[in-house]
């Protein structure tokens, strides 16, 4: 079983819809949870991060972590064509350990 | 401007011809890493370095070498490239976690698309 599972299936939504992405993981030692956004022909960029369980909101983006279920989610409200990108979840074990375990990524297309 | 640079951005080569992909960062980061990204497999770590002269294998190190002689540079070396190393390669760096900056924000370079025929 891979440490981080993210269904890589592409997702197409109409502009203004809510986008819901998720990842599951198997390693209970993960404590830091991140979402990276990758535009075509670019390197990934950090979008949001959370520590342990809970929710975090940043504008139209909400990240949720449920450590008891080993499940994390990213929601994009009022999606825009500029949100079209690949979204990768990433996790890290402990402070001072910079190694990240990445999911495969979800390609999201927001149709105007 | 804070950035990670990689060169070359595109490279087509033949099996067995040694090549080096350079990576440089100007943020004084201690941690640097190389990834490869393949369709359906996502980002996989090849090698990482916690600081100068300290390197370790990631998840897919076979066929690659690295060195970290200076803090800012972390080249990736393919001694004898093979077609299965055709991929998109990313270099990344991050701070050690001291201070107030979030330690897990890895800054990625623009990528190097390598084709081995």
Image (spheres, rainbow, N blue to C red):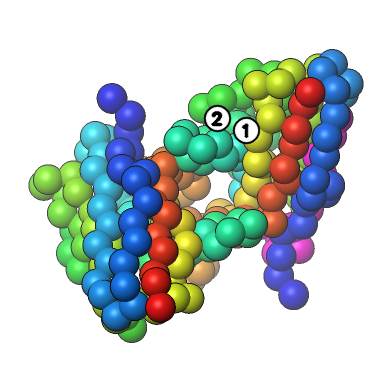
Q: Nearer the viewer, residue B39 or B60?
A: B39
Q: Residue at x 24, y 43 (%)?
A: A24
Q: Is residue A91 magenta?
A: no
Compared to residue A112, the image places residue B85 above or below, namely: above
Q: x, y (%) of residue B117?
A: 79, 23
Q: Quadrant of the N terminus of chain B?
A: bottom right
Q: Chain of mark 1?
A: B
The label on residue B58 is: 2
Residue B39 in view, yes or no: yes
User: Label 1: which residue?
Assistant: B47
Q: x, y (%) of residue A62?
A: 26, 71
Q: Residue at x 31, y 43 (%)?
A: A7
Q: Magenta region: which residues?
A: B19-30
The label on residue B101 is: none
Compared to residue B75, the image places residue A41 above or below, namely: below
State the SS at label 1: strand
Pointer 1 with pointer 2, Cβ within 8 A: yes
Compared to residue B99, the image places residue A93 above or below, namely: above
The quadrant where residue A78 appears:
bottom left
Q: x, y (%) of residue B86?
A: 69, 30
State the SS at label 2: loop
């Amino acid at each position: 079983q891979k440490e981080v599972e993210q269904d890589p299936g592409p997702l197409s939504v109409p502009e203004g819809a809510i986008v819901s992405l998720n990842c599951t993981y198997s390693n209970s030692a993960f404590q830091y949870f991140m979402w990276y956004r990758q535009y075509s022909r670019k390197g990934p960029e950090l979008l949001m991060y959370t520590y342990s369980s809970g929710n975090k909101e940043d504008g139209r983006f909400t990240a949720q972590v449920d450590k008891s279920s080993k499940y994390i989610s990213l929601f994009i409200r009022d999606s825009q064509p500029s949100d079209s990108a690949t979204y990768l979840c990433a996790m890290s074990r402990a402070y001072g350990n910079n190694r990240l375990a990445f999911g495969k990524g979800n390609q999201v297309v927001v149709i105007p | 401007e804070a950035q990670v640079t990689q060169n070359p951005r595109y490279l087509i080569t033949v099996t067995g011809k040694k090549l080096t992909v350079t990576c440089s960062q100007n943020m004084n980061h201690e941690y640097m890493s190389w990834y490869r990204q393949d369709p359906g497999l996502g980002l996989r770590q090849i090698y990482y370095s916690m600081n100068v002269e300290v390197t370790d294998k990631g998840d897919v190190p076979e066929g690659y070498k690295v060195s970290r002689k200076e803090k800012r540079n972390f080249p990736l070396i393919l001694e004898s490239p093979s077609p299965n190393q055709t991929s998109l390669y990313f270099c990344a760096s991050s701070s050690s976690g001291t201070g107030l900056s979030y330690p897990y924000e890895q800054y990625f370079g623009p990528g190097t698309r390598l084709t081995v025929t």
